[in-house]
Image (cartoon, rainbow, N blue to C red):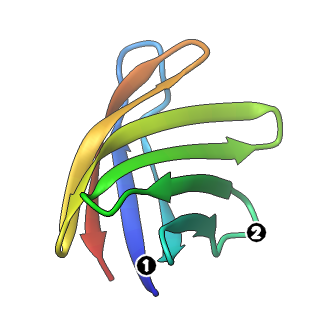
């Protein structure tokens, strides 16, 4: 069980970015935030698929985690960007 802090860079059509903490337990992704829900899975090789939701807003991310960090891309209805993760 460990937490990751995801920060994603925004593009022109998006707000200035955000951060969210997630937990991964036995390959399952969950959020420890009341404002944002997270779901998804991390494969044994470190590939991650995650969905973040805040009310009706939703973003889907894919990427790879390795040891204490990770990175990938995300997309939402009107924008997309990249994310990075650090073990916390």
The residue carrying pointer 1 sits among few (fewer than 14), some (14 to 19) or many (20 or more) residues within 10 Å by Cα, namely many
Secondary structure beneath label 1: strand
In front: 83, or 68? Answer: 68
Q: Quadrant of the C terminus?
A: bottom left
Q: Which residue is mark 1?
A: 3
Left or right: 56, with 21 as reference point: right
What residue do we see at 38% from left, 71% from top?
A: 4
Q: Tell me what residue is drawn at x 61 percent, y 15 percent.
A: 77
Looking at the image, which residue sits at the far front? 44
CA–CA distance in space, label 2 to label 1: 15 Å
Residue toward you, 27 or 8:
27
Q: Which residue is mark 2?
A: 34
- Quarter-wise, where is residue 35 in the image? bottom right
Q: Is residue 43 left or right of residue 58?
A: left
Give the total of numbered labels. 2
Residue 70's disc is none
- On the image, the x and y values in percent for residue 78 come to 56, 12
- Please, is residue 68 above or below residue 63 in the view? below
Horizontal and vertical percent for residue 27? Answer: 48, 68
Q: Residue most toward the bottom? A: 1
Image location of residue 64, percent across then percent down: 25, 50
Which of label 2 and label 1 is nearer to you? Answer: 1
Instruction: Judge left or right: residue 88 versus residue 54.
Output: left
Helix, strand or loop under label 2? loop
Q: Earlier in the sequence, mark 2 or mark 1?
A: 1
> In this picture, is 5 found above or below 61?
below
Label 2: few (<14), some (14–19) or many (≥20) C-alpha neighbours in 10 Å? few
């Amino acid at each position: 069980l460990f937490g990751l802090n995801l920060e994603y860079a925004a593009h022109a059509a998006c707000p200035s970015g955000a951060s969210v903490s997630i937990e991964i337990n036995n390959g399952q992704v969950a959020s420890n935030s009341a404002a944002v829900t997270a779901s998804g899975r991390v494969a044994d090789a470190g590939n991650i698929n995650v969905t973040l939701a805040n009310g009706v807003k939703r973003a889907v991310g894919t990427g790879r985690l390795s040891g204490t960090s990770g990175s990938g891309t995300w997309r939402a209805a009107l924008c997309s960007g990249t994310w990075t993760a650090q073990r916390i």
